[in-house]
Image: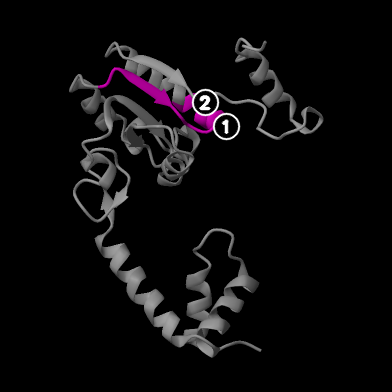
Amino acid sequence: MSFSPLVEQLMEALRVLPGVGPKTAQRMAMHLLERNREGGERLAAVMREAVERVGYCQRCRTLTEEPLCGLCESPRRDDSLLCVVESPADMLAIEDAGGYQGRYFVLHGHLSPLDGIGPEDIGLDQLDTLMEEGQVQEVVLATNPTVEGEATAHYIAAQIQRHGARLSRLAYGVPMGGELEYVDGGTLSRAFSGRLPFLGE
């Protein structure tokens, strides 16, 4: 048995979301059509407006419907400190953790020559222009600890060095509350290489 063409189109459309396979899409479609048409209408309206109006911040490239996002507009942020992240979700995670008061630059991805993603595709020309303004004194490379993330960090580091700014990398290691026997070898190795003095009694 197959559903009507419109129902099939709805299920296929829902599958563009990450992690949504055929069964999940079917469940979502059935829920909207059988139990929550009002919610479906609101979802459709907000989705259409977001797709039409949300773009990139002119300075940090995060998602916003304004020319500059709220963080770039804030006079309380430290202009001398710039954190480079791969996605707006990474930026949000750092903000939620608290403690960081600098600015951001969002790449929207990482370098991947095999996929045809080069420096211009992740805004590195715009990052270079930002560095030329001369306000940034330190760049924190907060790309993900993957092969592509590390390659991207090294490429950006070479680019930043021309501007004379300090470079730092997010520390990776043993998580708080974690047990050593369950930590993978790569994380342990990085934790040892990045160890700090212990100021105990």
Q: CB under 8 Å between callouts 2 and 1?
A: yes
Q: Tell me where residue 167 sits by quadrant.
A: top left
Say above or below: 163 vs 54. Answer: above
Looking at the image, how many numbered discs can be counted on the residues? 2
Q: For this rendering, which residue is in front, 171 or 44?
A: 171
Type of residue at label 1? Thr
| Residue found 66% across the figure and 12% down from its top | 200
Part of the protein shown in magenta:
136-152
Quadrant assignment, res 45: bottom left
Tell me which amino acid carries mark 2. Answer: Glu
Is 81 left, or right, of 184 in this rendering? left
Q: Residues within 10 Å of mark 2 (few under 14, many from 20)?
A: some
Q: Is residue 27 above or below residue 130?
A: below
Residue pointed to by mark 2 = 150
Give the residue number, with chain letter if any, for mark 1: 146
- Residue 172's tag is none
Which residue is pictured at 28% across the width and 68% down the height?
49
Residue drawn 56% across and 30% down?
Answer: 145
- The residue sitting at 69% across, 19% down in the picture is 189
Residue 173 is left or right of residue 60, and the answer is: right
